[in-house]
Amino acid sequence: MKMTDAIRGYMVAKTADGYAGSTMQVYNSRLKMLAGWLDNPDVEKIVTQDLR
């Protein structure tokens, strides 16, 4: 799945859950920033940490 598909699915789910359109624009802009950061070739690896 592409990151844009994930963003689109997230927006649809949150909109259906009752969030306002302006809130979704904020989520969309932040997720696009995240997608741009993840696609950055200078990032060697992404470290995940389980906080459970």
Image (tube, rainbow, N blue to C red):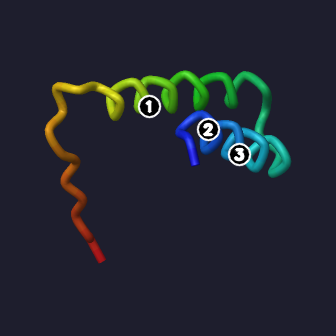
How many marks are shown on the rendered structure? 3
Q: The residue under label 3 is which amino acid type?
A: Gly
17 vs 42: above or below: below
**CB within 8 Å, label 2 to label 1:** yes
* Viewer-nearest residue: 25 or 44: 44
* Viewer-nearest residue: 49 or 39: 39
Q: Earlier in the sequence, mark 2 or mark 1?
A: 2
**Numbered badge on residue 35:** 1
Q: Position of residue 18 (x, y in %)?
A: 83, 45
Quadrant in the picture for residue 26:
top right
The residue to which callout 3 is attached is: 9
| Quadrant the C terminus occupies | bottom left
The residue to which callout 2 is attached is: 7
Quadrant in the picture for residue 49:
bottom left
35 vs 25: above or below: below
Mark 2 falls on what kind of element?
Answer: helix
Instruction: Characterize the local packing of mark 3: few (<14), some (14-19) or many (20 or more) Cα atoms within 10 angstroms.
Output: few
Real-space CA distance between mark 3 and mark 2, rounded to the nearest whole angstrom: 5 Å
**CB within 8 Å, label 3 to label 2:** yes
Q: Residue at x 14, y 38 (%)?
A: 44
**CB within 8 Å, label 3 to label 1:** no
Q: Earlier in the sequence, mark 3 or mark 1?
A: 3
Q: The residue under label 1 is which amino acid type?
A: Ala
38 vs 12: above or below: above
Instruction: Characterize the local packing of mark 2: few (<14), some (14-19) or many (20 or more) Cα atoms within 10 angstroms.
Output: some
* Viewer-nearest residue: 10 or 19: 10
Task: State left or right for residue 8 relative to residue 18.
Answer: left
